[in-house]
């Protein structure tokens, strides 16, 4: 396993500076904390379309240092250019994108504009500023309906919805960029199902509206905001018939970004890796774990399968382990507990 051996550059012995696009969002804010813990200087740019306004103050409270945050949209090129002009940046971690499968089918152009045009504009500004290190948020969605499990990075890529296609297009853009311009170092991270929250309860997933994803939905059943969980299908070929996914704690995911970044800054080169645990849980197992965390039974009803869903998706995390030394450390118990703790803090 590769050891975590980042050392400051000789020509710039200070802290390395990282720009986080979408850094006030769910995964971005947790990655902010992990980067600060690892000694990085971090600059956030976020348009707050899917982030809580008080996230920068909460990050300040959590890390004990001033948060540099620009409330700008990635599509506003002059605003992004100003950030690169104002800060010497060594690398970018690019989270800012839209991520709802359902919404992408009703507004595909919004998805292509935000996710694809957003990335291209960012890459152009990076090139202008001579910043060539990028960690990119991709998703297990690029595997479509995987033919073999656990899914390895060399599995066939496909998609059934505009959101998934935007991730595929972005991966292609990045692969061409590295192929034809060797200055670029890119870490493509394919996330499985991120859940949980920071153990402080100060940051977590924004909970406005009716969630698409399982754990935020269960969380709202637990608070009483939603009456029951709709279990989408109990007739899959899985242990209890409900869908199985590879849930990964958001702090494990965040630490995966730090490892990917260090690989790039060490000059070890580009990589594409799955970030998952390699262990799947069913919808009913997730519900049970959340019941333990919140201390009560949660109602559910079995409904028909959700269109586009597959029975089981589980990562093969071997590549992330071999290349980055990545290993998910937090278990399901911790995922549910920290999610519930975050919900309780938001209700205060
Ligand atoms: N589920 C329910 N009820 C709900 C929500 C989900 O039963 O209210 C079930 C789903 O049917 C599935 C499992 O819970 O079996 C997980 O569903 P999520 O919506 O939480 O996650 P998905 O795996 O469907 O989707 C996630 C991301 C997508 C990404 C996809 C690809 O949310 O952005 O993984 O791996 F595209």
Image (tube, grey):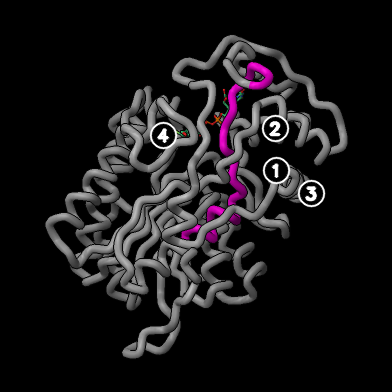
Q: Is residue 3 left or right of residue 180?
A: right
Please tell me whether residue 171 is drawn above or below residue 13 in the rendered image: above
Q: CA distance from mark 1 to mark 2?
A: 8 Å
Magenta stretch bounds: 239-257
Residue 92: which quarter of the image?
A: bottom left
Q: Are marks 3 and 1 in contact (CB under 8 Å)?
A: no
Q: CA distance from mark 3 to mark 2?
A: 25 Å
Residue occupying image coordinates x 73% and y 49%: 334
Q: CA distance from mark 2 to mark 4?
A: 20 Å
Of helix, strand and loop, which one carries label 2?
Answer: helix
Quadrant containing ligand 1: top right
Q: Is mark 2 within 8 Å of ligand 1?
A: yes
Residue for badge 2: 286
Q: Is mark 4 within 8 Å of ligand 1?
A: yes
Q: Is residue 344 left or right of residue 132?
A: right
Sequence-earlier tag: 3 or 1: 1
Instruction: Give coordinates of residue 7: x percent, y percent.
Output: 44, 82
Residue for badge 3: 348
Q: Could you tell me if residue 324 is visible in this image?
A: yes
Instruction: Give coordinates of residue 244: x percent, y percent.
Output: 59, 28
Q: Could you tell me if residue 72 is visible in this image?
A: no
Residue for badge 1: 332
Label total for image: 4
Residue for badge 4: 141
Residue occupying image coordinates x 28% and y 45%: 171
Residue occupying image coordinates x 46% and y 70%: 42
């Amino acid at each position: 396993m590769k050891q975590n051996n980042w050392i400051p550059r000789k020509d710039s012995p200070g802290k390395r500076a990282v720009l986080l696009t979408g850094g006030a969002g769910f995964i971005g804010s947790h990655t902010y904390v992990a980067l600060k813990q690892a000694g990085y200087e971090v600059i956030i740019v976020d348009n707050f379309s899917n982030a809580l306004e008080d996230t920068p103050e909460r990050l300040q409270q959590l890390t004990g240092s001033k948060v540099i945050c620009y409330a700008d949209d990635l599509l506003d090129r002059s605003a992004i250019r100003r950030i690169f002009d104002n800060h010497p940046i060594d690398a970018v971690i690019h989270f800012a994108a839209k991520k709802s499968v359902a919404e992408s089918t009703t507004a595909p152009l919004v998805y292509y504009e935000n996710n694809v045009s957003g990335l291209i504009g960012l890459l152009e500004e990076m090139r202008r500023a001579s910043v060539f290190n990028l960690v990119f948020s991709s998703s297990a969605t690029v595997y479509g309906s995987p033919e073999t499990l656990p899914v390895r990075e060399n599995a066939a890529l496909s998609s059934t919805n505009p959101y998934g296609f935007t991730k595929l297009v972005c991966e292609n853009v990045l692969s061409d960029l590295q192929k034809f311009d060797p200055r670029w170092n890119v870490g493509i991270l394919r996330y499985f199902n991120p859940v949980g929250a920071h153990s402080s309860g100060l940051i977590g997933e924004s909970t406005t509206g009716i969630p698409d994803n399982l754990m935020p939905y269960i969380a709202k059943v637990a608070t009483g905001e939603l009456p029951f969980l709709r279990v989408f299908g109990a007739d899959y070929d899985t242990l209890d018939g409900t869908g199985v996914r590879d849930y990964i704690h958001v702090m494990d995911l965040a630490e995966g970004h730090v490892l990917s970044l260090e690989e790039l800054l060490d000059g070890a080169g580009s990589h594409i890796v799955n970030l998952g645990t390699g262990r799947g849980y069913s919808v009913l197992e997730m519900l049970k774990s959340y019941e333990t965390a919140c201390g009560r039974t949660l109602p559910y009803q079995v409904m028909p399968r959700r269109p586009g869903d597959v029975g089981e998706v589980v990562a093969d995390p071997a590549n992330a382990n071999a290349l980055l030394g990545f290993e998910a450390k937090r278990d399901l118990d911790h995922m549910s507990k920290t999610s519930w703790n975050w919900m309780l803090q938001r209700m205060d």
